[in-house]
Amino acid sequence: MKKINTFRTWLLLSFSLSIIPLYANAELISEGEKTYDANCAACHQKKGIGQVGLAPSIGNRDFLAIASDDFIKSVIAQGRAGTAMVARPDLSGQKVDAIIAFLRSLPISNPKVIKVDNSLKFTGDIKKGADHYLKFCSSCHGTEGQGYSYGGPGPGIGLPSFLNQASDDFIFQTLKHGRSGTAMLSFIGATGLANLSEQDAKDIIVFLRNIDKTTTTKTSAPTGASQYSLCVSCHGQNAEGNIALKAPALQHLSEDYIVKSLKKFKLGARGYDPKDINGATMKSMAGMIADDKTMVMVAKHIKSLAVKTPAATIKGDATSGAALYAMCVACHGANGEGNPLLKAPALAGQADWYIVAQLKNYKAGLRGVHAGDPEGALMRPMSMILANDQAINDVAAHIQNLSKNKRSK
Ligand code: HEC
Ligand code: HEC
Ligand code: HEC
Ligand code: HEC
């Protein structure tokens, strides 16, 4: 009898001990899913399935087998400079742990265990590696490994931001195993796509590590369209904007205003406050545009895109908004067409949620207080006239009507 009791106690105890971490884990995973959906899903899609040309599938079996938690943490903390993967140092360690727990909890078929030795450093023949790279990799990853900005489906494996995060063996194991369910197949051995030998793969890795020093590959000069491919993932194919990523429409803006805004972001006259996450995101993107000439090129390209009127998302009283808008006419024009002499941008054609967000930013001093932004200094006092959120919503509702009128003209 005593024996059974002890057994029961033991059973109960071991059961409850094993279930506690399970509960704690379930909580972490569900927090991770929420954080992931809010911050990552717009690009990496629900459950990390990825989208070609937009963001890789980070819920992928082979990716998760090769990527350590530390690797994923470094991508989140540092981002991938030169791509739409923006650094998110603002996400707490707890949030990042939760995201990783969520990704690792996703159901996968035939889970794999792949050992990655991050201390390995391969040697090889750069010239041979370059030849193989051009033949087997460049069509998807770009002639210089520039990634999506090249227009192919593969990420930027020649960019320093990737190469600094990925060890030689991380790349090697990716070539060996591929990424199931994506265009990235296995390349090594008889079952591999190109039947490369292990040494061929090492040559390619050595080539990638020296890609900025080699002259075997040369891209053609950038064009407005090739530059805009860096913007597409957030601002959309026709620069119509993306509410999920808080990226505004651009097509209605003048070339001058686009260029001036890009300069302000690059110099930190916009997006300067860490509380302004969207401004900070755009600031890091503007930092990637090489020079003023390139900014003009990309602006001209944006002006060549088809016009789309963003859908209404804000509830406001357009009639009282029209009365308030009387104060804006002098600068932004009766039809929201903007005024180049006063450097005031067009508002008709912009999404209402962005109008609201910017008016709030001005009021809060997240925009328009930097010395490098004299136009914002003109605009900020005007935002102060709008007494409360209701007034802001009302004026946005009126501007939304101006956008619709513009479309029907
Ligand atoms: C605006 C789009 C966008 C958002 C939002 C975004 N990412 Fe990314 N992410 C990318 C792109 C693009 C890449 C590939 C960049 C490259 O190397 O070319 C990437 C790469 C990654 C990688 C590396 C994958 C690999 O194959 O090595 C990880 C991990 C990652 N992102 C995690 C996240 C997490 C976690 C979040 C949310 C906190 C997030 N990303 C939000 C666009 C995005
Ligand atoms: C048919 C197109 C295609 C070809 C050819 C191709 N790749 Fe990929 N590669 C991809 C895609 C797509 C991904 C990202 C998978 C995803 O979306 O999750 C990728 C991912 C990778 C990654 C992981 C990058 C990261 O951010 O973690 C490496 C490394 C890589 N490829 C190397 C190569 C090399 C080297 C070659 C040539 C031997 C090559 N690839 C050929 C499409 C391709
Ligand atoms: C990772 C997403 C992302 C990418 C990629 C991106 N942007 Fe942005 N962009 C934003 C966000 C978010 C804002 C809004 C910033 C704010 O709220 O102040 C913005 C704002 C802007 C503005 C200001 C618009 C206005 O009405 O004042 C311009 C101009 C702009 N982006 C141009 C570009 C160009 C050109 C590129 C490509 C070289 C680009 N962006 C790439 C996210 C992005
Ligand atoms: C004295 C002239 C002036 C008046 C009046 C004025 N604005 Fe502006 N506004 C500007 C200027 C100049 C900018 C551009 C700031 C910059 O270059 O970043 C601007 C920017 C904006 C923006 C940001 C647009 C974008 O694409 O990022 C919004 C929204 C805006 N104004 C709304 C209004 C509203 C609503 C009113 C009336 C309540 C108003 N403005 C009155 C001059 C004015």
Image (cartoon, rainbow, N blue to C red):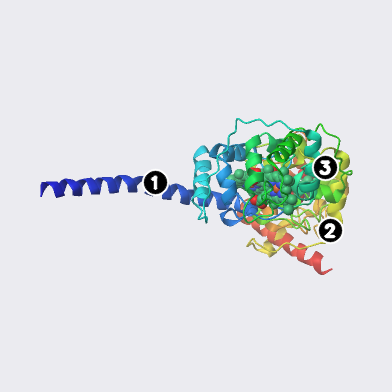
* Secondary structure under the numbered disc 1 in the rendered image: helix
Q: Quadrant of residue 394?
A: bottom right
Which residue corresponds to mark 2?
Answer: 305
Which residue corresponds to mark 1?
Answer: 24
* Secondary structure under the numbered disc 3 in the rendered image: helix
Question: Residue at the location (15% across, 48% down)?
Answer: 5
Q: Where is residue 365 in the image (x, y as percent from the top left)?
A: 66, 40
Q: Where is residue 123 in the image (x, y as percent from the top left)?
A: 71, 30
Query: Going by the picture, which residue comes out furthest to the bottom?
Result: 408
Q: Earlier in the sequence, mark 1 or mark 3?
A: 1
Q: What residue type is labelled 3?
A: Lys
Question: Residue at the location (81% across, 44% down)?
Answer: 134
Looking at the image, is 320 positioned above or below residue 5?
A: below
Q: Nearer the viewer, mark 2 or mark 3?
A: 2
Looking at the image, is 329 positioned above or below residue 82?
A: below
Using the image as rendered, state which of residue 57 and residue 170 is in the foreground.
170
Mark 2, ligand 3, within 8 Å: the answer is no
The answer to whether 338 appears left or right of 395 in the picture is right
Which residue corresponds to mark 3?
Answer: 260
Q: Earlier in the sequence, mark 2 or mark 3?
A: 3
Q: Where is residue 147 in the image (x, y as percent from the top left)?
A: 75, 46
Q: Can residue 248 be seen in this view?
A: no
The answer to whether 305 appears left or right of 325 in the picture is right
Using the image as rendered, state which of residue 59 and residue 275 is in the foreground.
59
Q: Earlier in the sequence, mark 2 or mark 1?
A: 1
Question: Residue at the location (70% across, 64% down)?
Answer: 311
The answer to whether 98 appears left or right of 164 in the picture is left
Quick one: label 1, few (<14), some, or many (20+) residues within 10 Å?
few
